[in-house]
Amino acid sequence: MPCCSEREILDTYACIGTPALASSMDTNRLKDLCAGLPGAVAQLHGGPANILVYSVDGKRFAHFKTSQPEQWRFSIKASPERFLELTDVPGIKPARWLARFHWVTIVDVGSVPEDYLRELVHWSYRKALDSLSKKRRAALLSLAF
């Protein structure tokens, strides 16, 4: 019998090693956040895509553009309601090719408050995790601790 629920594991994991929240997050810290989630894997795709993809068991939850002129633009999946909210914010736009699936692109991650950005990343990660089977999800989360 597991010691805690899946939600408790994720909530605990989200707090481990979290520094005091600053007003904004830089690209390197955001990459560390994405890579540090349980089961997350980073994969660099070269041309023509030129993206650094973060996924959990093959399900994408975030990516960075790695080439100019859009270098370090960050894209994540959002809920349909939040998609509409986010695309009204200056510096956040529908993601090219993925907007129909409610992905948004944040042009400058430093312009978004850190706690809000963390919330968005965790939601996108959770959505990818929830698309896995219960057995696979449990296996990934058990490896985290």
Image (spheres, rainbow, N blue to C red):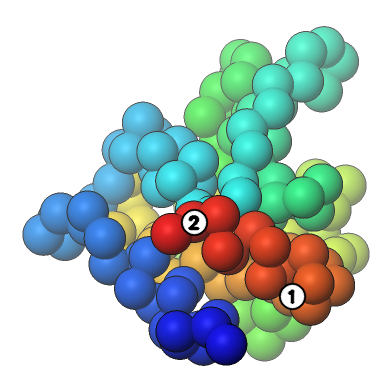
- Taking the spot 61% from the left edge, 80% from the top edge, the residue there is 82
Q: Would you say 78 lies left or right of 7 here?
A: right
In-front residue for pair 67/62: 62
Q: Position of residue 75 (x, y in %)?
A: 63, 48
- Taking the spot 33% from the left edge, 51% from the top edge, the residue there is 111
Residue beneath disc 2:
144
In-front residue for pair 70/57: 57
Amino acid at dot 1: Asp
- Taking the spot 82% from the left edge, 47% from the top edge, the residue there is 58
* 127 over 24 or under it: above or below: below
Q: Secondary structure at mark 2?
A: helix
Mark 1 surroundings: few (<14), some (14-19) or many (≥20) residues within 10 A: few
Mark 2 surroundings: few (<14), some (14-19) or many (≥20) residues within 10 A: few
Q: Position of residue 130 (x, y in %)?
A: 74, 75
Using the rendered image of the protein, determine whether residue 143 is visible from the camera's viewpoint. Answer: yes
The alpha-carbon separation of the residues under discs 1 and 2 comes to 16 Å
Amino acid at dot 2: Ala
Residue 24 numbered mark, or none = none
Question: Disc 1 or disc 2, which is closer to the eye?
Answer: 2
Q: Would you say 30 lies left or right of 136 here?
A: left
* 138 over 22 or under it: above or below: below
Can you say which quadrant of the picture contains the N terminus? bottom right
Q: Residue furthest front?
A: 1
Between disc 1 and disc 2, whose residue precedes?
A: 1
| Contact? badges 1 and 2 (CB < 8 Å) | no
Q: Secondary structure at mark 1?
A: helix
Residue beneath disc 1:
130
Q: Position of residue 113 (x, y in %)?
A: 29, 61
